[in-house]
Amino acid sequence: MLAIVLASLLWGTTGTAASFLPPGVSPLATGAATMGVGGALLYLVSFRRATAVLRDPVARRWVLIGAIGVVAYPLAFYAAMDLAGVAIGNVVSLGSAPVFAALLEYALDRTRLTRRWAAATALAVAGVALLGLGGAHTPQSGGDDGGSAGAGIALGLVAGASYALYTCASERALRRQHGSGSVMGAMFGVGAVPLLAVLAVTGAPLLAAPSSLAILAYLAVGPMFVAYLLFGAGLRSAGASAATTLTLLEPVGATALAVLIVGERLGPVAWGGLGTVLAGILLLVSARGRQRST
């Protein structure tokens, strides 16, 4: 649980870090660079074990399915933040993920979710809905435009579905008794190939300023490489549904950074949403603690 919380806090810094990139850098290049380079690093540090995962026919099937989400997620996620703002882009992307994860688990395993999990997730999703309704604006952002915000919200839903897809696929590959770092290395290594191709097409502006490379290095190593090692370790025991609910800490942290550093402004409704998300996560953590103590 702690590993997933730490990963979520790292992920929450992505939007703020990306906001310091030059205007000419597209969100597609940012997303492709972050998870393309980070995914390649994950594969390289676990080369032999990740290759063993790819040689396992059952695990390989889940790795390939999950890699679809790995490719779609960063492209949709960074585009959502670019169009709708850092706070709302994070809120919609991560707030929708538990819903998609629950639907996938029901479709794949007919998993019956507990009432406590449903209550915790309902609180958390209600909180991110309040964040979205409360709005966030910054004088430089295009998120105030209704059309741009609507497109950003739609892309946020794509990101949420993609995130749930590779989370569920990762959990099923882990059932083959491969290490979490091995599964993450294999899945993100496969996903890195098309992402690096996207980067080759869109990434020229990243080379225009040394500061861009420094920000890219942070995004690839911190919120990508380190965070996904933590996430893989936590996913082994937490499960996809609990993991996607816990990662709702990300939009909370991202919103706080967007307000304090980027300059986005939230109203009272949005601040109430932050508290509601935290209440849902605390309910989930307390439920897991009781299950382990018994």
Image: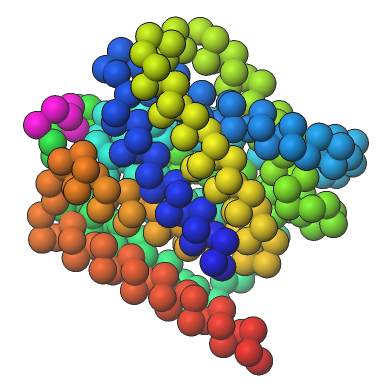
Say which of 260 and 254 sits in front.
Answer: 260
Residue 237 figure quarter: bottom right
Of residues 40 and 55, the one nearer the viewer is 40
Note whether residue 225 is visible.
yes
Question: Compared to 242, does 196 lie above or below?
Answer: above
- Residue 258: % across, % down: 24, 44
Which residue appears at 56% of the width and 83% of the height?
Answer: 289
Return the x and y of residue 272 as percentages of the image width and height.
Answer: 19, 65
Residue 209 percent across, percent down from the top left = 36, 13
Q: Residue at x 57, y 87 (%)?
A: 290
Specify the farthest residue to the bottom. Answer: 294
In the rendered structure, does residue 140 fall within the stretch colored magenta?
yes
Q: In the image, is residue 186 part of the stretch drawn in magenta?
A: no
Magenta stretch secondary structure, dominant? loop
Q: Is residue 107 visible?
A: no
Image position of 146 with respect to 272: above or below: above
Count of numbered badges drawn on the protein: 0
The residue that appears at 66% across and 21% down in the rendered structure is: 193
Give the residues drawn in magenta, as a range: 139-143
Instruction: Tell me the quarter of the picture where residue 147 sits.
Output: top left
Quadrant of the image containing the C terminus: bottom right
x 21%, y 39%: residue? 262
The quadrant the N terminus occupies is bottom right
Left/right of residue 45 with respect to residue 100 in the rendered view:
right
Could you say which quadrant of the image residue 101 lies in? bottom right
262 left or right of 101? left
Q: How is the image coloured?
A: rainbow
Q: Position of residue 181 (x, y in %)?
A: 73, 48
